[in-house]
Image: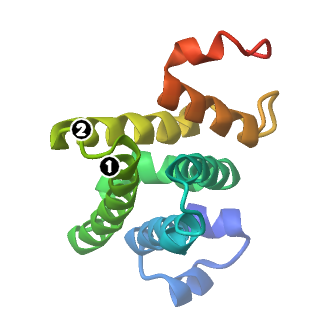
Amino acid sequence: MEDIARLLKMSKANLYYYFTDKNEILAHILGSFLDLILDGIDEFLSSTDNVDERLRRFIQRHVDIYARYMFHAKVLFKEVNNLAHKDLKRAKEKERQYYRVAKGLIAQYVGSSAKEEEITALTFFLLGMCNWSYSWYDPKGKISPSRLSELIYRVFKGGISSLKKDAGV
């Protein structure tokens, strides 16, 4: 707590006014980030009837949030299991809510011919492509978040061979 207070340029007593311990700070960071991810997602996706466009928007939104809140994403993936049990349970439920949104979208996209286990695998493929950008992606680098989301969308939708036609890749 002393290190955190020093970094925030506040007294430890002032920090304790807002948070009782490090776990509470971690729970606040992760809870706020997960709320941000979930906030308005259903309305956002339902703003178009075109399932292809919904998939594109989902990926774009996900990449944009992760690019703007890169450090929050890192904390989520590296520290979520350090939460106290009750806070971990809340965080995992929010993660499941987001997974259900993604899985519902994938189910709509592939249609009724896909098996449940295939939809599950595709959902994890997509989330893996989007989520792991936190570990290597630089939003200030040569690939913009918009371009990154387009690459993810095209590879997910058509496989890597769909990029052969694109001279920019």
Q: Is residue 127 above or below residue 166?
A: below
Rendering coords of residue 66 (x, y %): 60, 50
User: Is residue 63 visible in this depiction of the protein?
Assistant: yes
Q: Which residue is mark 2?
A: 114
From the image, which quarter does the C terminus lie in? top right
Amino acid found under the numbered disc labelled 1: Ala
Labelled pair 1, 2 in contact (Cβ < 8 Å): yes
Using a 10 Å C-alpha cutoff, classify the residue at mark 1 as few (fewer than 14 neighbours), some (14 to 19) or many (20 or more).
many
The front one of 83 and 18 is 83
Q: Is residue 89 above or below residue 119?
A: below
Residue at left 37%, top 34%? 125
Q: Secondary structure at mark 2?
A: loop
Coloring basis for residues: rainbow
Q: Secondary structure at mark 1?
A: helix
Rendering coords of residue 50 (x, y %): 55, 55
Q: CA distance from mark 1 to mark 2?
A: 8 Å
Mark 1 / mark 2, whichever is N-terminal: 1
Residue at left 64%, top 16%? 163
Q: Is residue 53 left or right of residue 93?
A: right
Rendering coords of residue 8 (x, y %): 69, 69
Q: Which residue is mark 1?
A: 107
- Res 113 quadrant in image: top left
User: Is residue 136 visible in this depiction of the protein?
Assistant: no
Q: Is residue 100 left or right of residue 126?
A: left
